[in-house]
Image (tube, rainbow, N blue to C red):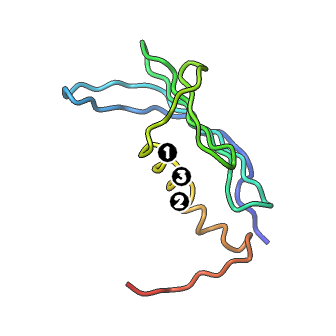
């Protein structure tokens, strides 16, 4: 059996386009830990922009929660839904289907 990466950290730069047409550049860090016994992975996304609070969104295996400069915040429902959808519907999930002894079936259009 082939296993994909188990844990890691990705770092990069992000550019946000604001409503007034201006842009802001910052840093993004994504940390992940894939668990073999469950069909999900722990994930944390951290966004840092100059002159703005650091935003962290974390999935701990059961729930999605966020912090702003270390203080807990309540996430918008669509933010949480988008975060959960990205966890389940990314390309790695398709690549890992054999690890879970699952089958891929064509269901048509």
**Which quadrant of the figure contains the C terminus?**
bottom left
Question: Local crowd at mark 2 within 10 Å, few (<14), some, or many (≥20)?
Answer: few
Quarter residue 67 falls in: top right
Question: Local crowd at mark 3 within 10 Å, few (<14), some, or many (≥20)?
Answer: some
List x then y, in percent, for residue 32: 67, 44
Question: Local crowd at mark 1 within 10 Å, few (<14), some, or many (≥20)?
Answer: some
Pointer 1: what residue? 80
Which of the labelled discs sits on residue 90, or is there none? 2
Front one among 25 and 35: 35
Q: Secondary structure at mark 2?
A: loop
Classify 84 as above or below 20: below
The answer to whether residue 105 is left or right of residue 101 is left
Gap in Å between the C-alphas at discs 1 and 3?
A: 6 Å
Pointer 3: what residue? 84
Q: Nearer the viewer, mark 1 or mark 2?
A: 1
The answer to whether residue 11 is left or right of residue 24 is right
Classify 102 as above or below 55: below
* Residue at far top of view: 51
List x then y, in percent, for residue 42: 68, 46
- Residue in view at x 56 percent, y 32 percent: 66
Quarter residue 99 falls in: bottom right
Classify 32 as above or below 74: below
* Residue at far left of view: 20
**Which quadrant of the figure contains the N terminus?**
bottom right
User: Of the residues under marks 1 and 2, which one precedes in the sequence?
Assistant: 1
Gap in Å between the C-alphas at discs 2 and 3?
A: 10 Å
């Amino acid at each position: 059996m082939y296993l994909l990466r188990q844990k890691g950290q990705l770092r990069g730069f992000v550019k946000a386009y604001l409503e007034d047409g201006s842009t802001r550049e910052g840093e993004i860090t994504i940390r992940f830990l894939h668990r073999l016994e469950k069909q999900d992975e722990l994930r944390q996304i951290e966004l840092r922009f100059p002159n703005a609070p650091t935003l962290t969104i974390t999935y701990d295996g059961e729930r999605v929660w966020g912090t702003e400069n270390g203080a807990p915040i309540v996430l918008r429902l669509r933010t949480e839904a988008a975060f959960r959808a990205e966890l389940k519907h990314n390309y790695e999930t398709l690549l890992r289907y054999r690890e879970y002894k699952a089958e891929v079936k064509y269901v048509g259009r």
